Structures are given as structure tokens and as C-alpha cells.
Amino acid sequence: MPHERASLLQGTLDLLILKALSTGERHGLGVSRRIEQITDGMFAVQPGSLFPALHRLEEAGWLASRWEASEHNRRAKYYTLTRAGRRQLGEETAHWNRIALAIARALKA
Amino acid sequence: MPHERASLLQGTLDLLILKALSTGERHGLGVSRRIEQITDGMFAVQPGSLFPALHRLEEAGWLASRWEASEHNRRAKYYTLTRAGRRQLGEETAHWNRIALAIARALKA
DNA sequence: TGCCGTCATATTGACATTCGATAGGAACGC
DNA sequence: GCGTTCCTATCGAATGTCAATATGACGGCA
């Protein structure tokens, strides 16, 4: 039960998706649920954001996908991080840290 | 001198403008320079972002403005935080802190 | 007087991203 | 069959940012 549900900060969606997939294969809604979980319910990714983003990341070569039956026996597309995706996750994490630090510093001044 | 210049995270522009004005009256370009200063050169706000944002914030009642001669004797519009603007700065700061914390937690998991 | 560089505000057009709403198919329980 | 849940998918709209450019005023200088 989240206290507040924030809309995503633009630019963090890719990062969160890559992170959600870093612990293993998931299908679309699974990614969405994982993001909600690791952000403590702070961020909820809508389908209209999620699927275009997944396609974009796959297009970029950071994700690979295959069709498979879900745990509820529905057809689902499972995504995995590619090696390039794992590298990208590292870069985006570092990028985020730099930005968050800069803003934190600015807000303290 | 900045090592890297990032484009703004969408949603942080208002926050940075309010913060830049929290230490006193500034005109448009002065706000821009102040942001660059307090973020250690990390963020540079372009005119095409800056002026619409200033107008938006004034429209919202968070800024007040008046025409005055600049330090170089050009006509410049000086902006000040209103009381509501100061309150807004507090809220947006708190909001940012919650978001940054949630993402930091997510990235550590 | 005329020209130019700088300062400063402002607008325009393009672009990416996110969201809300909606659609639609497939499996399951009844 | 029928509704419900699960899952992928697309569309339209709104928003926010940027790059490029326009406009004008001042000061310095020849």
C-alpha cells in the first residue's frame, strides 16, 4: 500500500526496466510488477508506457525476447537482458547517480 | 568546469528554477547561470526551456516579476519567489527526495 | 554617424516520452 | 457458453525539453 504514487520521472523508465530484468527473465506485466515491488509501490508503470518502452529497448539491442507460456498458462513474451543491456544498466545507473548527486547538492546550497 | 553536461530530467526544471530564486531576485539569464552554478555545471537550461517555464511558474502564482535595468544596463525582467512559490519549493523538494530515495533503493536491491 | 558584439527576452518547430483509455485474444472456472 | 482474469498491444493527447532563431537595446569604437 503505497503512500503516494508518483508518475515516472522521464528518463528513469528505461533504467527501472533494465533493473527489473537484471534478476532474471520476466514477461511484460512481470516487469511492471517487479518495478512496483522494488520501488516500494512508489512507481506504477502503465501499459501505455511499458510496452513501447520494451519494444524500444529490444530494438536497441538491450533486451531479447521469446514467446513462452506464463505461470498461468497464457502466452507471454519473456524478456531477458542481453550483454549489451547489462552494460547499459551499469551506465544508466552511474548516470542516475551523478544526476541525483548534482540535484541533491543544488538543493542543499 | 563540468565533466559532463546532462540534459535535464523532465520534472526537475521547475524545482531548479524555484531553488535558484530562493536566494533572491534574478532575471531570466541570471536564473540560468545560477542553476549552472549550483549544479556544478551539470545542468544547462536552454532559453527555449527557460522562458516558457518562467512564464508557467508566474502564471501559477509562484513567481512575481518586474522590469528593471540589469547590471549591464539592459532592460531585464526580474523574478522573485512569492510566498506560494516558497511553499511550492518545499513541496517539490520533498517530492524529489521521496523519488530519489525510491530509485536509490530500487537500484540497490 | 554607422557598425558590431554582447546582453536579454522571446518564439517557433521538432522531438521524445509518458499516460489514459481502449482493444482483443486466450485460458480457466462455473 | 459466459464472465473473469491475464497478457500483449495500440492510439490519441498532453507535456516538457531542446535547437535554432528573432528582436531589440546598449556600449564601444572608428
Image: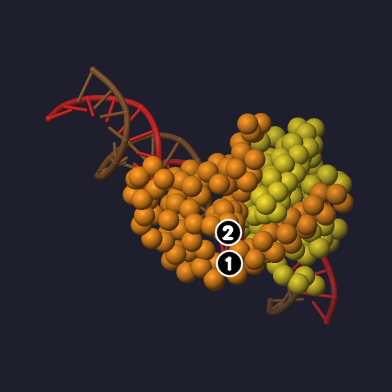
Chain colours: A yellow, B orange, C red, D brown
* Residue A100 pos. (x, y %): 71, 48
Residue that carries the numbered disc 1 in the rendered image: B86
Tell me which corner region of the image, top left, top right, bottom left or bottom right, holds residue A46: bottom right
Q: Amino acid at mark 1?
A: Arg
| Residue drawn 81% across the image and 49% down it | B107
Q: Could you say which disc has been placed on residue B76 in the image?
A: none
* Residue B43 pos. (x, y %): 59, 42
Residue that carries the numbered disc 2 in the rendered image: B22
Mark 1 and mark 2 in contact? Answer it, CB < 8 Å.
yes
* Nearer to the camera, A17 or B88: B88
| Residue drawn 61% across the image and 49% down it | B9
| Residue drawn 68% across the image and 41% down it | A57
* Residue A54 pos. (x, y %): 68, 47
Picture layout, residue B51 above or below residue C29: above
Relative side of A15 to B18, left or right? right
| Residue drawn 72% across the image and 70% down it | A4
Tell me which corner region of the image, top left, top right, bottom left or bottom right, holds residue A43: bottom right
Residue B85 visible within the image: yes
Residue A64 visible within the image: no
Q: Amino acid at mark 2?
A: Ser
**Which mark is first along the chain, 2 or 1?**
2
Picture layout, residue B27 above or below residue D21: below
Q: CA distance from mark 1 to mark 2?
A: 7 Å
Picture layout, residue B18 above or below residue B30: below
* Nearer to the camera, A95 or A18: A95
Quarter placement of the N terminus of chain A: bottom right
The chain letter for the residue carrying disc 1 is B
